[in-house]
Amino acid sequence: MAAAAAGPVFWRRLLGLLPGRPGLAALLGRLSDRLGRNRDRRRRRSPWLLLAPLLSPAVPQVTSPPCCLCPEGVHRFQWIRNLVPEFGVSSSHVRVLSSPAEFFELMKVDCLESTLEKSLQAKFPSDLKVSILLDFTRGSRGRKNSRTMLLPLLQRFPEQVRVSLFHTPDLRGLLRLLVPERLNETIGLQHIKVYLFDNSVILSGANLSDSYFTNRQDRYVFLQDCPEIADFFTELVDAVGDVSLQLQGDDSVQVVEGMVHPYKGDRAAYCKAANERVMGVVSSARARQQALHAQTFHSDSLLTQEDAAAAGDRRPAPDTWIYPLIQMKPFEIQIDEIVTETLLTEAERGARVYLTTGYFNLTQAYMDLVLGTRAEYRILLASPEVNGFFGARGAAGAIPAAYAHIERQFYGEVCSRGQQARVRLQEYWRSGWTFHAKGQSTGTWRPRSPS
């Protein structure tokens, strides 16, 4: 949800790319130094800017679980179910979309407002509910924003619509007053991108603004008729919503009754309550899935894919395993970090790992693993011209150049070790498009066939 990193070095490097701004550089330098000293006294790191994980020398200490990766077989990654729920589904229910247009076609549904209106006019009470989870800072940016767009819907259907605005606990006090809009989003964000419709789920990195439906390439996975997965993500969104601020019809916000305020209340108490609420969902879903697998997937009632169509309510044997990873570092939830580090550590010779990112900002720990393991790596990056910040005004306009600089530094290290054949970097470029796809070992890694 939020990336943790150190801040002062980033401010100086980024502002160094913008000549003629000595006053601003001095002010931000003093501010970041003061915040850095406070951070050290509190013995915790604050989540600073996008690039800081790589620029910071600190390497997070993560205790990985015992890894039981087997050489062959469908349960190569079964150890992950010790951390999160394991969902077994048929591949016929999984569809990977390839373009913004395809994403748009799938997302096109009847107008939400008209659907709610019909539910009010129905002869019998409707159980239709709409739950929307957004980030507070990003959803409140500017005069016309997500909040103002959703207010009429909330005012008209107050009993059926819920709008939750997650506010990072790290943006508080003097920092909250001084850091301007847009820049304050770098302190921490709610970044879940999941779209739920009844028993179907779309997992993506895409937002719902125009470019994501036209010329901004992202990733999209459609899980159709997967009720257990839909239930899990519904519960997860509800849990994060409960620890978020609730938008009211007058554009004010309130905390859920009994919940600590995210930036006015005690930070430790809020993070503890949030951890318990979110991990409660993970733990209960994990136990539920373990019981379901013992009863269903490991019994004699499974059908082959060919026989499933004629089997009524009996389910085909799962051939695809889904593990939803969660990262909410302010709440001390680092499941994604643990799993990713373990996967990279266990990647053996002959394996090929695929990574893709719109923003090349691997942590130092991940970079050391890429350079120190024996697997082959294929890393797809955004070229500076298709970076979403390309051509932006102010400090944001320097971000693509900063990422390109980091990329060159990393590739220089690859070349100095003579690993160009093992670690290959490619840049995505398409005229008039931007690139936003992020994925770690999409489809896992596949051992090469002997030549």
Image (tube, rainbow, N blue to C red):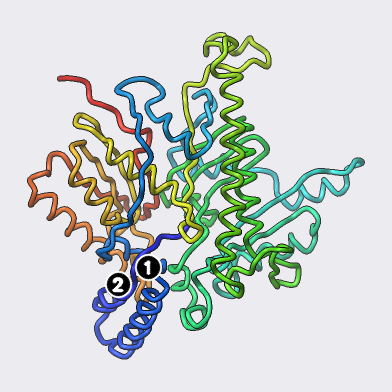
Above or below for 382 versus 304:
below
* Residue with the most extreme bottom position: 23
Q: Quadrant of residue 449?
A: top left
Q: Nearer the viewer, residue 101 or 389?
A: 389
Residue 429 relative to residue 144: left or right: left
In terms of image quadrants, where is residue 244? Answer: bottom right
Task: Kindly give the residue lying farthest to the right in the view shown.
Answer: 123
Question: Tag 1's secondary structure?
Answer: loop
- Look at label 1 and name its amino acid: Leu
Q: Disc 2 residue type?
A: Phe
Figure check: 15 above or below 22: above
Dot 2 falls on a residue whose secondary structure is helix
The answer to whether marks 1 and 2 mark residues whose Cβ atoms lie closer than 8 Å is: yes
Name the residue nearer the viewer: 348 or 424.
348
Q: Which mark is residue 229?
A: none
Tell me: residue 400, above or below residue 132: below
Q: Position of residue 84 (x, y in %)?
A: 50, 39
Compare residues 414 and 78 and report the one nearer the observer. 78
Judging by the rendered image, the residue that carries numbered circle 1 is 49
How far apart are the two marked residues, 1 and 2, measured between alpha carbons? 7 Å
**What residue lies at 55% left-to-right and 54% top-to-bottom?**
208
Callout 2 environment at 10 Å: few (<14), some (14 to 19), or many (20+)? many
Count of labels shown? 2
Question: Is 125 drawn above or below residue 321 in the view shown?
Answer: below
Q: Which residue is at 55% across, 34% downward? A: 223
Q: Position of residue 332 (x, y in %)?
A: 47, 56
Which residue was labeled with disc 2? 10
